[in-house]
Amino acid sequence: MTGRAAREKLAGPIRRVGVVLRSRDKHLPNAVERLQALCEARGVELLFDRGDLSGAPEGVEPLDLAREDPDLVVALGGDGTFLRAARLVAGRNIPLFGINLGQLGFLTSTAADDLEAGLIQVLEGKGEIDRRFTLDTQITDREGAKGEVMTALNDIVIHKPGAARVTPIDLSVGEGEYRDEIGSFAADGVILATPTGSTAYSLSAGGPIIVPALECIVVTPICPHSLSVRPLVVPASRRITVRPLDPTHQLQLTVDGKVARILAPRDEVVVARGRHEVSFVRLPGQTFFGTMRRKLNWAARPPERS
């Protein structure tokens, strides 16, 4: 579904573009000015996200997704900005195009220096859709009451805030009414990541890189206190339950890098394949492996000795 061969062309025409900004970035004013000039020259209307208008030009129309969907959303920043934009468009079939103003920008499609060249290709109908699935998470309390459903594009993390101290965690996996115990371990926490998020926090914690075309969830313990506990790849059709075992340890739930909830004693966190997808816009010729080599320096050869 998300493989290179399955990509579809971005349907046009593009007349209204929503913009999500990375605030307080020294490169932002120049990038916004260039974006505005390009869109004005091509008769494209710009709408700026209400969440942060500090970097938007004066007098611009705010982006109101409750009123009307734009034809495209541009994330102007790094991966954090892209994730914020992804939460806005998840499940709405609005394509998302990332322009990197940050350091790594693994999720974005073009660098700030190539803003005009990249966006012109998209406006001319040369963009390609790369669909990525999300994760839904829900907390069930000790009485069995279920909380709100929260959605992540990258990962869901259950961990201890503050001091570095391991905590016991129990994992189980299920499908339908069936639930099978994976086991328990002591660690700083656990990461549950999509293939999209496998190159983020999960990778830093020793998890595998997963090609986005695969339908799976990566379970990566954070600094486990045992050599026998290793990352686990689970089919995306399974439902994963995380249960903290020590009620005296305060844990928190983080969704795509944002603290969502402090867990109460005997809370359970249930994670499953999300109901929504996010449509990335890629430029012609862009592939996951090309991005991996370029941005992660994967399998780079050392310089030859003279």
Image (cartoon, grey):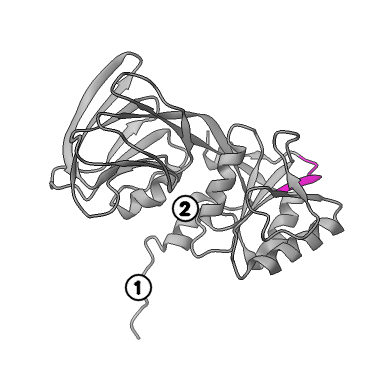
Q: Answer whether residue 123 is magenta in the image.
A: no
Residue 302's label in the rendered image is 1
Residue located farthest toward the top when viewing the structure as drawn: 177
Relative vertical location of residue 120 with respect to residue 262 in this rendering, above or below: below
Q: Is residue 130 visible?
A: no
Residue 125 in the image, given as x and y percentages of width and height: 75, 46
The C terminus - image quarter = bottom left
209 sits to left or right of 36: left
N-terminal label among 1 and 2? 2
* Image: 295 above or below 147: below
Q: Secondary structure at mark 2?
A: helix
Which residues make up the magenta segment? 12-18
| Amino acid type, callout 2 | Phe
Would you call the spot at circle 2 few (<14 residues within 10 Å), some (14-19), or many (20 or more)?
few
In the image, residue 16 lies in the stretch drawn in magenta: yes
Q: Relative to the observer, which residue lies in front, 200 or 152?
A: 152
Residue at image position (80%, 42%) is: 13
Q: Secondary structure at mark 1?
A: loop
**Quarter occupied by residue 279:** top right
